[in-house]
Image (spheres, coloured by chain):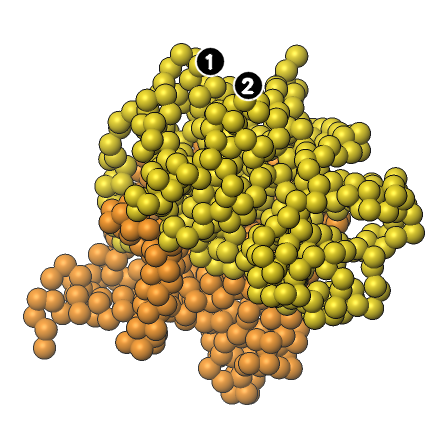
Amino acid sequence: MFYREAGDFKVSYRDDSQTFPIKFDRYRYYVVLAVAFGIIPFIINDYWANALLLPFLIYAIAAIGLNILVGYCGQVSLGTGGFMAVGAYACYKLMTAFPDVSMFIHVLLAGGITAIVGVLFGLPSLRIKGFYLAVATLAAQFFLVWLFNRVPWFYNYSASGQINAPERDVFGIIITGPNAPAWATYLFCLIFLTLCAILARNLTRGTTGRTWMAIRDMDIAAEIIGVNPLKAKLTAFAVSSFFVGIAGALFFAVYLGAVEVGEVFGIQKSFLVLFMVIIGGLGSIFGSFAGAAFLVLLPVVLKVVGVDVLGWPTDIVAHLQLVIVGALIVMFLILEPHGLAQLWRVAKEKLRLWPFPH
Amino acid sequence: MKTKLATLALGALMAAGPALADLVIPDLSYRTGPYAAGGIPFSDGYNDYFTLLNERDGGIGGVPVRVIECETGYNTEKGVECYESTKGEGALVYQPLSTGITYQLIPKVTADGIPLHTMGYGRTSAANGKVFSNVFNYPANYWNGASGAINYLLGENGDDLSGKKIALVYHNSAYGKEPIRTLETLAEKHGYDLTLLPVDHPGQEQKSQWLQIRREKPDYVIMWGWGVMNQVAVQEAANIRFPMENFIGVWWSGAEFDVEPAGDKATGYKALTFTGLGDDYPVYDDLRQYVADAGKAAGAGDQLGAVQYNRGLYAAMLASEAIKTAQEMHGVADIDASMMRDGMEALEMTNAKMDSLGMAGFGPEFSVSCENHGGPGLVGVVQWDASTGTWNKLQDFMPTDAEVIGALIAEDSAAYAAENNISQRCE
């Protein structure tokens, strides 16, 4: 009834090709933005920021990055944790070397450095694909973690081998360190997520995105119609690593504040982000959000329900959490292999016909 | 975005809690994952001691203690989540039993004004109270442990370790890397060779490290391990027939579950300790009567007397004594976190006090001051005997190389103070 194209006339190509062509969708998007920027910063507290919203925002950036590589360009990567580590360590080195520069620039530069590293590790993708590429990126994961553990220069020769985020600001507002207010860290990550999502959305529906998808769907055919596989694959690696690097930098500097590379950016992080992308939906920006939300929020919600509401022992809840999340992943993959994004798409189709289905 | 709204609603539900007078002690435990073997007994001991105080004495100073348990799985992200979710409840002190989580929490607790007690773990230079106002690591820290192990070896070798080869098998994390600097400084002082052998998380794969030990034949192996890593290391040492009496673990590598899987071959394995072991203390009679037999024990209730259970007990005892000190200092029974911090800084543990608690000789005598948050750093040595299943005391609590450790602490804490623009206190 409300959700339909009928009556929503477009008089220019520009209107016709916008991200949200349906009026209801568009307003919903504005409402979400208004709530995220205009309301949440005023009601947020430390718990909401550090336990739920920051991880969600940061994982969403990482998931968008990986989705570009896996979902849009079809290059399987298990190196996300390692690339996040590159972003984190690049950000740390920049923060300590140039204390007066704005955090904004540090994070962007950290993304840029990760993009360069990502392109280097993406080079093998020109020769190998599928499982073999997954193994090559797995090697990147282990190599990068080993490197950051092994070379003391990366952690400024600290005794513990940890990196700690010193206090840094943007326009005088503290963003990192323990004294950073919750709203500032939240807004900082939200701005990055919004920019990344808009950038990714527009890249993926333009020429670049179409060449990525052509490579994904059939690389030989793509080459025949004139897509340059070198350019397509390497840009996918670069853009993807840029996002993942930003996520790593934020994860370290804003969210955790202290990082130990083997624990925080280990192989399990790569899998976690990959799961987000698969559960959310391959080749969908919305799916990246949905997957990140699913895997960040669900464990916390289960914990709150199990421990705080039902009063069960913490170890039983922790085990149940694994069982339930695991079962839900399997269930989703069986019932809806295209992820949460597909469920959303189906729901929208239904809504268009509601209340008079065929 | 819809899920965000749903969780908002859920959070509103959570925020509305009861506000009775109680002393809130969060217990960031880990009963799951590769480090659960150590996390379970520690958390059980920690919980049981407070249960005992509630059941026997009606709390501390008449105010009941409420322990909030939160599962971290030894994972720093979950640790942060646990910290944020419990600090609003009026948490008095955090004891995360994880060096990684400690590093996360040091700046946060300092900003929030909540004390952090890392007993025998965490950041060693936090012993310098001039820089770390809210962090305490009495009665002993890792650098005491490293020096204690070397002192013990010096004693075995007639005060001469020159030319000896010592290998350090360590968990490749902030925890395992802590002793390296001390051992290196001591190597210069005493002239032994130090080989570093990192083991990656979780520590199940150690074949190559022990192959290297077999090839290089070090005279002694010192281990900084935790969780499943310990069992594997002891097993591997037995497999290459490394003489167990030359193998010394830090206190976190010296519990029953670390040596039992290797069976008889583990006999002779040594470990450091800063607490009493076994259940031959009067406090255990009360624990059995009020907690275990009453069915109120935490977890499965089968850990009484275990090494890490005793450590949990000791940590809880130190916390409750600090609460008592704080109550006396401020004349308030229902203290808050800043009073707790004062209480910890003024804590004095005497033999008479421990005697009255039924824990005579459980730990060393010490007093905390504004400058010294690290305690005396006394380290004992015990040895495993598989036939009786007990740890036998080889060396009583002995002092460690204060000169070397003091210089290292001053250096590291000064670096931290410079990095974070902290001005020194206590003047």
Q: Quadrant of residue B62?
A: top left
Residue B123 locus on image (x, y percent): 63, 38
Chain drawn yellow, letter? B
Does residue B80 appear in this view?
A: no
**Disc 1 chain ID:** B
Label 2 lies in what chain? B
To which residue does mark 1 refer?
B329
Q: Residues within 10 Å of mark 1 (few under 14, many from 20)?
A: some
**What is the secondary structure assignment of the residue under circle 2?**
loop
Write down the residue under mark 2.
B346
Crowd around label 2: few <14 · some 14–19 · many ≥20 (10 Å) = some
Q: Which chain is orange?
A: A
Q: Residue at x 48, y 59 (%)?
A: B33
Disc 2 + disc 1, Cβ < 8 Å: yes
* Relative horizontal placement of residue B179, taking residue A294 as reference (left or right): right
Front-lying residue, A87 or B302: B302
Q: Is residue B153 left or right of residue A344?
A: right
